[in-house]
Amino acid sequence: MAAGDGDVKLSTLGSGGERGGDGSPGGAEATAARSGWVAALLATGGEMLLNLALVALVLLGAYRLWVRWGRRGLCSGPGAGEESPAATLPRMKKRDFSLEQLRQYDGARTPRILLAVNGKVFDVTKGSKFYGPAGPYGIFAGRDASRGLATFCLDKDALRDEYDDLSDLNAVQMESVREWEMQFKEKYDYVGRLLKPGEEPSEYTDEEDTKDHSKQD
């Protein structure tokens, strides 16, 4: 019989030192060749997985830096610490605000700019280049910025015209809101609470007002 595929198969089943009629390796040699090919394939696949893991780590690091520097820009970036005519306004006496009252302080109707985070109202007038009408975060001026900050969204859809109790935010987003609250409290003057519908404002004494401002200096 002429050497062919049948010979190769037979020789493969035979002794490890034999070769098929067409000269191809048989037995153990064929098995070893296949094993080497599989090992090489696995090694290549492992290397690819390692490279993908490294790329994922780099992207994760870049995202964290982006979030960190984005927050710096919102809270203390260029313009936030620069003096402007509006920044020379006297400190605002402590008081509470309804949503309607808060909206008056958008930097357009009055030079003073306020925003709320997690039920707290902050005077961000000294950051007017950021929070003023022409600023990159002017959308938050005179508004409750909690939802926009929690989702890192600068779109109007992230702000609500009615009181927002944030009850639909998840645990991670609520933790983000609390972190923003602390950052604003460190940087800007806390001037009062954002009132819930039907809630009566508190009456603050001059002593309470002075004590609160002295904590931030």
Image (cartoon, grey):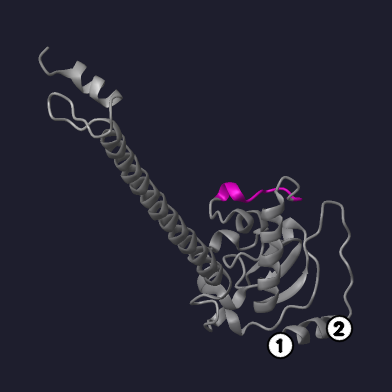
The disc at residue 63 is none
Residue at 60 percent of width and 85 percent of height: 88
The image quadrant of residue 18 is top left
Above or below, 46 against 177 in this view is above
- Residue 7 in the figure: left or right of residue 63: left
User: 61 or 1, which is in the foreground?
Assistant: 1
Q: Position of residue 6 (x, y in %)?
A: 20, 16
Q: Which residues are magenta?
A: 156-165
Counting residues from the start of the chain, the first of labels 1 and 2 encountered is: 2
* Residue identified by numbered label 2: 206
**On the image, which quarter does residue 126 sit in?**
bottom right
Q: Secondary structure at mark 2?
A: helix
Q: Give the percent coordinates (x, y) of residue 11.
A: 23, 24
Query: Which sits in the foreground, 50 or 172?
Result: 50
Residue 138 percent coordinates (x, y): 54, 63
Looking at the rendered structure, which numbered label has been put on residue 217? 1
Q: Residues within 10 Å of mark 1 (few under 14, many from 20)?
A: few
Residue in the picture at 12% in, 18% down: 3
> Can residue 103 be seen by looking at this rendering?
no
Judge whether residue 160 is colored magenta: yes
